[in-house]
Amino acid sequence: MDQKSGEARAIRVSVVTILGNVVLTILKLAAGLVAHSGAMVSDAVHSASDVLSTFVVIAGVKLAGKEADREHPFGHERFECMAAILLASMLAVTGLGIGWTGVGNILEGADALPIPGRVALAAAVLSIVSKEAMYWYTRAAAKKLNSPSLMADAWHHRSDALSSVGSFVGICGARLGIPELDPAASVVICLFILKAAWDIFRDAAAKMLDTACPEEMEEEMRQTALAQPGVLGVDRLQTRLFGNRIYVEVEIAADGEAPLAEAHETSAQVHHAMERRFPMVKHCMVHVNPRIVASKRLP
């Protein structure tokens, strides 16, 4: 899939989830207010943050898709990582706010806590199903496009689904005579959200810091280079993640007595094979080291 098609698909997925989250936010907020459920209101706030975060994803995808220019000769892919880091920060702030409200309600005591109505339970079930569906839908697109910001948004949906599970448990507990469980569910929701925020931030930061590819992938790249005609060995191979793309630098050994044109053809074969085998490789730099073939050495 080319970059423009990938960008269009990412935006299409984001628009679908925005519409779903707007509907869920309205339903959950109404249910929380009508049924007097703090957990469901917290859940509605979480869904509202999903809408804002998805706009951040769209902006990140659009900026990352810009062509390289004079000031940014290596492209703009890291904008996606920046979007994911911003999204993680927003998620953490949302989680802390929900947790703070939940702790405050617990400290007020059971006598001050209303018993949630049945409509809050129905809203929690609807949210769990809807948000889990959004998670798998967005995750599939993120894996297909190798998009960190879209994957971050997918985990945002999953954290919302988990928070709705917490809401459901809390509301059930409150209706069974333990009203403290409703605000306690908000605290649990806070922890889920903070965990998701940390995972998103850690992944995006790794891609901002030129982290190497996994060892298994580097070994596969090494074997790809060795499989090309004229390659006598791989002296060095280095990789770095650049947003959702990969840069590769490889030093190969080739016949030191072969013509320059032949050595160039060998390096070109390695370059093309690497970019064909690994679609996320944006560029592969190949350096040729001369090696004297044993059979050609003088006795």
Image (spheres, rainbow, N blue to C red):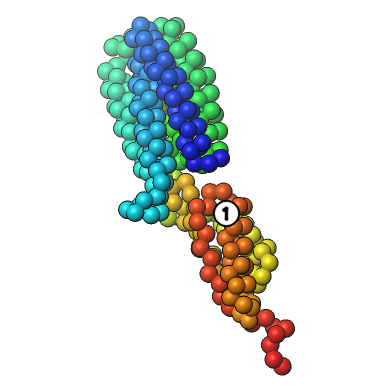
- The answer to whether any part of residue 24 appears in the image is yes
Image location of residue 67, percent across then percent down: 41, 46
On screen, residue 262 above or below 285? below
Q: How many marks?
A: 1
Please give the name of the residue rendered at 56% of the width and 72% of the height, measured from the top-left corner. Answer: 288
The C terminus, quarter of image: bottom right
The N terminus, quarter of image: top right
Please give the name of the residue rendered at 61% of the width and 67% of the height, measured from the top-left corner. Answer: 265
Residue matched to label 1:
275
Image location of residue 129, percent across then percent down: 52, 19
Quadrant position of residue 37: top left
Please give the name of the residue rendered at 55% of the width and 33% of the height, measured from the top-left corner. Answer: 140
Quadrant position of residue 231: bottom right
Please give the name of the residue rendered at 58% of the width and 69% of the height, measured from the top-left corner. Answer: 264
Image location of residue 211, percent across then percent down: 45, 55
At label 1, counting other C-alpha atoms closer than 10 Å, the crowd grade (few under 14, some 14-19, many 20 or more) is some
- The answer to whether any part of residue 171 appears in the image is no
Judged from the image, the secondary structure of the residue bearing numbered disc 1 is: helix
As drawn, the residue found furthest toward the bottom would be: 299
Going by the numbered disc 1, the residue's amino acid type is Glu
Please state which of residues 108 and 230 is positioned toward the viewer in this rendering.
Answer: 230
Please state which of residues 175 and 249 is positioned toward the viewer in this rendering.
Answer: 249
67 with respect to 288 (left or right): left
Please state which of residues 102 and 147 is positioned toward the viewer in this rendering.
Answer: 147
Image location of residue 4, percent across then percent down: 48, 38
